[in-house]
Image (cartoon, rainbow, N blue to C red):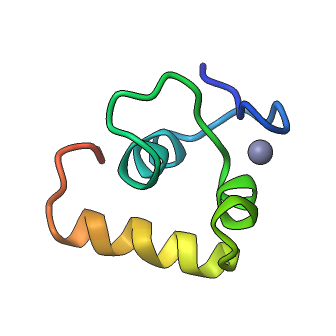
Amino acid sequence: MSRCAACGKELESDEVAITRKLVNRGCDSFYCVSCLAARFSISEEDVRALIERFKAAGCSLFY
Ligand SMILES: [Zn+2]
């Protein structure tokens, strides 16, 4: 189980995938939705909406 590199929360697979999408496909540290939102100065709702958009687009990072 991966943990958020900022707060230590256990991560869902979607959170690992959206970190790859927003930060770097090859990154090895991952962030939870709230830490990603803080890092990119967007809301948690925006991060969740992006996850849904990438899933709907069939992005292979999401499963
Ligand atoms: Zn976090």
- Image point 70% across, 59% down: which residue? 39
Q: Where is residue 48 in the image (x, y as percent from the top left)?
A: 53, 71
Split into 4 quadrants, where in the image is the N terminus?
A: top right
Vertical position of residue 48 compared to residue 12: above or below: below
Does 7 sit above or below residue 47? Answer: above
Residue 46 lies, in percent from the top left, at 56, 80
Residue 30 image-quadrant placement: top right
Farthest residue in the right direction? 7
Image position, residue 27 (x, y; %): 44, 28
In-image side of 2 versus 20 (left or right): right
Q: In this view, does 51 lie to the left or right of 33?
A: left
Query: Going 69% across and 27% down the picture, which residue do you hit?
Result: 3
* Total numbered labels placed on residues in the image: 0
Q: Is residue 17 shown left or right of residue 53? A: right
Is residue 56 positioned above or below 19 on the image? below
Horizontal and vertical percent position of residue 58: 14, 60
